[in-house]
Image (tube, rainbow, N blue to C red):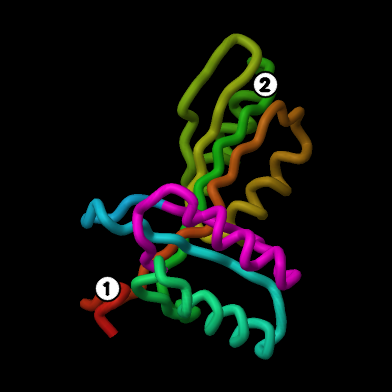
Amino acid sequence: MLVTNEAGVAARLTSLYARRGYNIDSFTASPTNDPKLTRITLVLTGDDRKFNQIFTQTAKQEFVHSISLMEEHDLYRELLLLKIKASKKERSEIKEIVDIYRGRIVDLSNKSLIVEVTGESEKIDGFMNMMENYQIIDVCRTGITGLRRGDRGLGEE
């Protein structure tokens, strides 16, 4: 959705969903090419009835400029930063796994490294499963963000 870029919008949205008992699986917000607008990507869990209800209620909010449902064929990505404790021996093993997942090592110290992996959530989950054999120090996942494929942007339906 595209919303007015002003303080409190995210809080009002999350409050709307919480009051109605909806769980937010993923919430990302970012600036757009228009400084007056913010793009928010939400992933919610629920049946069609609940989804239609929350979609309608969200669209009615005065700060919502445009809202649409993304389709399976649209482009979705998530970013993972993962800090792992790694001995010299483990580094080469980890590097092989990172390469398979097309990630990259973005920081290296004597006893740890930080890996960056981007892709669909299933890819991130698969990478995390592979890393369970190592000592994970810290994890940061951005949540899902996405864009529609094709020539038109959100709000140009």
Q: Residue at x 69, y 22 (%)?
A: 85
Q: Measured from the top left, where is residue 27 in percent x and y?
A: 55, 57
Quarter of the figure with residue 135: top right
Q: Nearer the viewer, residue 102 or 43?
A: 43
Kindly give the residue lying farthest to the top in the view shown: 110
Q: Measured from the top left, where is residue 5 in percent x and y?
A: 35, 54
Q: Nearer the viewer, residue 25 or 122?
A: 25
Q: Measured from the top left, where is residue 22 in percent x and y?
A: 71, 70
Q: How many marks?
A: 2
Mark 2 or mark 1, whichever is nearer to me: 1
Q: Nearer the viewer, residue 146 or 53?
A: 53
Amino acid type, mark 1? Gly
Tell whether 49 sits left or right of 150. right
Looking at the rendered structure, the secondary structure element under dot 1 is loop
Height in image: 131 above or below 29? above
Q: Which residues are magenta?
A: 1-29
Residue under numbered circle 1: 153
Q: Residue at x 53, y 60 (%)?
A: 120
Height in image: 136 above or below 65? above
Count neighbours of disc 1 (C-alpha within 10 A) and say few if under 14, some if 14 to 19, many if 20 or more: few
Q: Residue at x 75, y 31 (%)?
A: 134
Height in image: 35 above or below 134? below
Quarter of the figure with residue 92: top right
Quarter of the figure with residue 44: bottom right
